[in-house]
Amino acid sequence: MCKIIKVLINIAVACASASVTILLYNYFHRERNEVIFFYGQQPTCDYHLGKTTAINTLQIGKCYMCKVYKIIGWLNESRSTLDICMYMLTYNLFVNAIIDAHRRGVKVRLIVDEDNVSTTWKLGTMGISKKVKRKIYNVNLMHHKFIIIDNKKVILGSLNWTIKGVHNNWENTFLTNDFKLVGPFIQEFQRLWNEF
Ligand SMILES: [Zn+2]
């Protein structure tokens, strides 16, 4: 009888610990997928036009600036590393978010196609590590647009970080923490970093 009770207790403990493990896993590894679309010619909300001091939540889905600040919010989550692989990077709001990350101690690395704009020069002069596509590849474009945050999240999509991209184009960008996706991008970033 005593033996049966012990076995039952062991089963109960095993079940409880499995449940706790699952709960902890779900708590610390919550799946996160967020998508943002840019819809060509886009309006600006009253808040970002400076007409009001309060954001109207009904306008967030339409205002391109609200969407830009959503992406900047993703970048502001970085705590240890920010690996950016971006074909065109000219929009100062994104550049400032990169500088902010660098200043709070995040190790920023940047890969670009060409180093021919003031924004990428500026990042280089601030001590941010940068690699530029090798000259021998002048007919091939480093056309990627992906950003890895803390080796845990990746931002992907069609969007170049330009004012035209966010204000005039139809674009998509999304963030995921699915490691099946994040892992290959970490490897590809490192491969390009070593190659360039
Ligand atoms: Zn707005």
Image: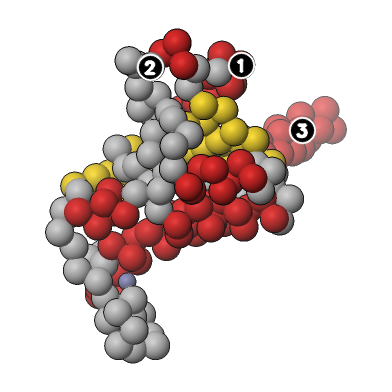
Q: Which amino acid is tagged 3? A: Asn
Which is nearer the N-term, disc 2 or disc 1? Answer: 2
Name the element at disc 3.
helix
Q: CA distance from mark 3 to mark 2?
A: 66 Å
Q: Earlier in the sequence, mark 3 or mark 2?
A: 3
The residue to which callout 2 is attached is 138
What amino acid is found at the position of numbered circle 1 in the picture? Answer: Asn
For residue 83, which numbered disc appears in the image?
none
Ligand 1 near label 3 (Cβ, under 8 Å)? Answer: no
Left or right of 16 in this view: 185? left
Q: Depth check: 6 or 88 in front?
A: 88
Contact check, label 3 and label 1, Cβ < 8 Å: no
**Quadrant into which the C terminus falls:** top right
Tell whether label 2 touches label 3 (CB within 8 Å): no
Q: Tell me the residue at 32%/15% (across/down).
A: 139
**Picture coordinates of residue 77, whole percent (x, y):** 58, 54
Q: Residue 10, labelled with which disc?
A: 3
